Image (cartoon, coloured by chain):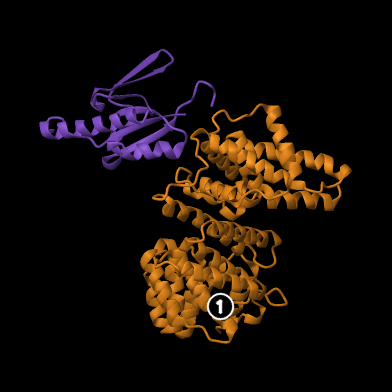
Chain colours: A orange, B purple
């Protein structure tokens, strides 16, 4: 089959998958069945498009084919509420008119994936599979699970959505903050999976990062008054805007402190600032607001100002007070190392749980950096070794190896 | 769609339970059942006699293995169950949250296989 046709099919599949599943699920009464008929439609596309050419509106073609498949299989949802059926009809009209399926449908699907009844470790993979159409086998590595195992667990999770009938309506107001938290956590996890993947060089993980950003934008657009939703969007924008600066010409790793702000994406940073303003509209405090504020503080370098490490240390202090995770403690230590002293940083690192920090790469990298500044070459070398052993990204590994060699 | 709600309550020493406490508990369960009935979601339900009255049976080949006590050895006791009619899991969970056992013990919510194959 010709590469352009296959590429077109993959592109449509990736961009439209979530919308199509969400629309179809209202008709099939379940996401598993929706994913199945969409799969069948994609197979048909693979059969027919090479000869006939890619249709003018590929998404609409897939939708129509999938609907025909539903009729063929007799998979009609028996208990579709009147409102759901009505929405489905509206959806079909919009589809036929060439418009995209509503972002509200995508948001509903995200709430389903992040439902508390779904095992916490499955929410992110489920979201990636159902909303972004990612293949279980391909994402398994990111979750450190064998592909077959992830596939099985996802099938079970999808079956649970159907048998327990996890509904598509948005949560009640009193449940919304907690439920939204799960959605935001899952999106953030998806982004870090994409970003931690061999960053700039790997097209697949870079696409994943961008798609996570798209998910965050959908939530932000649907919940303009929710501070945490706006803050997550801002956070991802700030991080993604820096991507061009993360690698030098030779593909080497460039740490944040050494990045050239001129390489940062200006329009993304601007969008991030806008989202931050929306996030600050309420007098609330939340995890993503704090994280985004830190990234905003780093972003001021593009105006020529230097980094306010004291402010960043305070923000991370707040984050540690809310969520004393190993990550937050490590980040606080790094900031305190810049704002106060390496000794103070080491003290903070020591407060992290021994077991959890043992295999946490950043803890060792920060420790190595601080011990270096304190003149403890032996301790620093040991910490660099641990960090190197825990680093998956070859470019970062090389960077750390060089730092260790420069100790001598 | 039907869901079974299983009420797991912390064990109480029946010898110690005084009449006032028992009456108060009875009120709670009565109120809950009435709420389910009034909302039209009640399908069926029963209280069960305490766990120690249970008998567990296994048949393996020709051997019949009979044990005194419940199947699951948990701290909480299965005190009773309801079957309710709810449109989706969130609606069922909302009812389960009001179940008196939810705040003292635990409540399991399980979808029932429906006869029309749903």
Q: Residue furthest right?
A: A51
Q: Which residue is pictured at 43% across the width and 80% down the height? A: A311
Q: Residue A219 or A100: which is nearer the viewer? A: A100
Query: Looking at the rendering, which quadrant does residue A25 occupy?
Result: top right
Residue labelled with disc 1: A299
Query: Looking at the rendering, which quadrant does residue A399 occupy?
Result: bottom right
Q: Residue A5 or A70: which is nearer the viewer? A: A70
Q: On screen, B109 above or below A104? A: above
Q: Which residue is pictured at 45% across the width and 27% down the height? A: B112
Q: Which residue is pictured at 58% across the width and 47% down the height? A: A105
Read off the chain for label 1: A
Taking the image as shown, residue A62 lies to the left or right of residue A1, namely: left
Q: Residue furthest top?
A: B62
Q: Which residue is pictured at 68% across the width and 42% down the height? A: A93
Taking the image as shown, residue A133 lies to the left or right of residue A278, namely: right
Q: Residue B57 location, x and y as percent?
A: 35, 19
Q: On screen, A319 above or below A299? A: above
User: Is residue A164 something one can see in this rendering?
Assistant: yes
């Amino acid at each position: 089959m010709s590469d352009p046709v296959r590429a077109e099919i993959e592109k449509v599949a990736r961009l439209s998958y979530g919308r199509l599943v969400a629309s179809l699920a209202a008709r099939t009464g379940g996401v598993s069945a929706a994913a199945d008929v969409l799969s069948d439609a994609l197979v048909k596309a693979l059969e027919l498009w090479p000869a006939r050419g890619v249709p003018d509106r590929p998404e609409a073609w897939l939708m129509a084919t999938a609907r025909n498949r539903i009729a063929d299989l007799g998979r009609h949802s028996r208990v579709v509420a009147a409102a759901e059926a009505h929405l489905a009809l509206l959806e079909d009209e919009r589809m036929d008119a060439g418009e995209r399926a509503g972002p509200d449908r995508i948001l509903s699907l995200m709430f389903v994936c992040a439902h508390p009844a779904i095992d916490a470790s499955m929410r992110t993979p489920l979201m990636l599979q159902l909303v972004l159409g990612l293949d279980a086998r391909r994402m398994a590595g990111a979750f450190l699970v064998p592909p077959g195992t992830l596939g099985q667990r996802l099938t079970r999770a999808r079956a649970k959505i159907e048998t327990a009938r996890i509904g598509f309506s948005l949560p009640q107001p009193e449940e919304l903050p907690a439920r939204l938290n799960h959605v935001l956590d899952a999106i953030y996890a998806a982004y870090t999976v994409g970003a931690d993947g061999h960053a700039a060089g790997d097209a697949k993980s870079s696409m994943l990062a961008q798609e996570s950003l798209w998910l965050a934008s959908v939530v932000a657009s649907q919940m303009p008054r929710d501070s945490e939703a706006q803050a997550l969007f801002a956070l991802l924008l700030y991080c993604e805007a820096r991507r061009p600066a993360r690698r030098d010409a030779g593909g080497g790793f460039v740490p944040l402190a050494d990045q050239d702000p001129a390489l940062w994406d200006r329009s993304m940073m601007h969008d991030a600032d806008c989202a931050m303003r929306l996030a600050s509209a309420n007098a609330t405090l939340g995890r993503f607001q704090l994280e985004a504020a830190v990234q905003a503080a780093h972003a001021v370098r593009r105006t020529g100002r230097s980094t306010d490490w004291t402010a960043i240390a305070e923000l991370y202090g707040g984050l540690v007070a809310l969520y004393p995770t190993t990550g937050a403690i490590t980040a606080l230590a790094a900031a305190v190392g810049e704002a106060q002293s390496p000794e103070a940083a080491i003290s903070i690192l020591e407060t992290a749980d021994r077991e959890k920090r043992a295999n946490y790469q950043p803890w060792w990298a920060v420790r190595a950096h601080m011990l270096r500044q304190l003149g403890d070459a032996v301790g620093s070398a040991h910490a660099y070794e641990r960090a190197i052993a825990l680093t998956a990204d070859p470019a970062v590994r090389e960077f750390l190896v060089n730092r260790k060699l420069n100790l001598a | 769609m039907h869901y079974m709600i299983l009420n797991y309550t912390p064990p109480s020493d029946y010898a110690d339970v005084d009449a006032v406490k028992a009456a108060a508990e009875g009120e709670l369960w009565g109120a809950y059942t009435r709420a389910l009935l009034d909302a039209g979601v009640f399908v069926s339900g029963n209280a069960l006699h305490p766990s120690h009255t249970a008998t567990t049976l296994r048949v393996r080949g020709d051997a019949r293995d009979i044990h005194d006590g419940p199947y699951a050895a948990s701290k909480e006791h299965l005190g009773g169950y309801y079957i309710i009619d709810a449109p989706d899991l969130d609606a069922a969970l909302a009812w389960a949250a009001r179940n008196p056992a939810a705040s003292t013990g635990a409540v399991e919510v399980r979808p029932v296989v429906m006869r029309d194959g749903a």
